[in-house]
């Protein structure tokens, strides 16, 4: 098990993971969602991306990852989410140390994270997964590692992405992603660093 990592000081204050976003979520009002950007027309998903829990999880990580200068396929990203989906980073305010959060629409995320992801290399991979399911509802605790380059020996960040997924209309949808980075005084518990064999 790796030791908990400190957040790199070069990470922009407004960003943490799942593509970055949220190191300073309490800047401004943490309780209010930012004004939503106009949403483009719905995009049809690639059936292979939404055929299973594993497929949609893989697609989310894949679409946000890439080398510096590579434009992300944001239409593919949009196609994974149900209408009204939310992305919610939580983390500590760097000035006060208080925990806060930010609630974003898909378009908020694209506009905030897109320039950071495309301007610098960013690769996020899932290293462990815990799944709970009842009927069409699935909750996934997905432990991630983030790197600047795909071949970096060590990640600059780890954390947990909490996915809420729904099976509807013959496919899987992401309803919410809620995440928190690891801190030196709050290491990821051991049970979230390994996947049960039947879940991954």
Image (cartoon, rainbow, N blue to C red):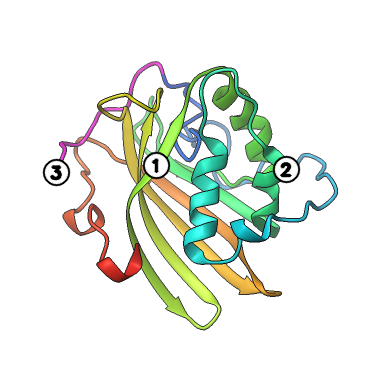
Among the 4 quarters of the image, the one containing residue 77: top right
Instruction: Identify the secondary structure beneath mark 3.
Output: loop
> Which dot marks residue 103?
none
- Residue displayed at 68% across by 39% down: 74
Looking at the image, residue 164 lies above or below residue 122: below
Q: Nearer the viewer, mark 1 or mark 3?
A: 1
Could you give the CA–CA distance between mark 1 and mark 3, rounded to whole angstroms? 16 Å
Instruction: Identify the secondary structure beneath mark 1.
Output: strand
Horizontal relation, residue 147 to residue 185: left or right: right
Query: Is residue 105 something one can see in this rendering?
Result: no
Q: Quadrant of the C terminus?
A: bottom left
Among the 4 quarters of the image, the one containing residue 123: top left
Query: Is residue 47 something one can see in this rendering?
Result: yes
- Is residue 9 within the magenta segment? yes
Looking at the image, residue 198 lies above or below residue 129: below
Looking at the image, residue 143 lies above or below residue 72: below
- For disc 1, the marked residue is 125
- Is residue 38 within the magenta segment? no
- For disc 3, the marked residue is 1
Front residue of 112 and 30: 112
Could you give the CA–CA distance between mark 2 and mark 1, rounded to whole angstroms? 20 Å
What kind of secondary structure does the magenta stretch mostly adopt? loop
- For disc 2, the marked residue is 75
Could you give the CA–CA distance between mark 2 and mark 3, rounded to whole angstroms? 36 Å
Horizontal relation, residue 142 to residue 74: left or right: left
- Residue displayed at 23% across by 48% down: 188
**Dot placed on the residue nearer the N-terminal end, 2 or 3:** 3
């Amino acid at each position: 098990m790796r030791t908990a990592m400190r957040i790199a000081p070069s990470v922009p204050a407004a960003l943490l993971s799942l593509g970055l976003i949220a190191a300073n979520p309490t800047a401004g009002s943490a309780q209010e969602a930012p004004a939503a950007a106009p949403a483009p027309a719905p995009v049809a998903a690639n059936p292979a991306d939404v055929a299973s829990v594993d497929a949609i999880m893989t697609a989310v990580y894949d679409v946000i990852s890439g080398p510096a200068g590579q434009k992300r396929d944001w239409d593919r990203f949009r196609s994974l989410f149900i209408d009204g989906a939310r992305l919610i980073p939580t983390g500590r305010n760097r000035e006060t140390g208080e925990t806060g959060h930010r609630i974003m629409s898909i378009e908020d995320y694209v506009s905030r994270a897109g320039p950071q992801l495309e301007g610098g290399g960013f690769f996020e991979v899932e290293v462990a997964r815990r799944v709970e399911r009842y009927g069409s509802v699935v909750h996934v605790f997905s432990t991630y590692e983030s790197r600047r380059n795909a071949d970096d020996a060590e990640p600059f960040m780890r954390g947990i992405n909490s996915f809420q997924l729904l099976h509807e209309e013959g496919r899987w949808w992401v309803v919410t992603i809620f995440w928190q980075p690891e801190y030196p005084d709050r290491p990821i518990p051991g049970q979230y660093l390994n996947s049960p064999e039947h879940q991954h």
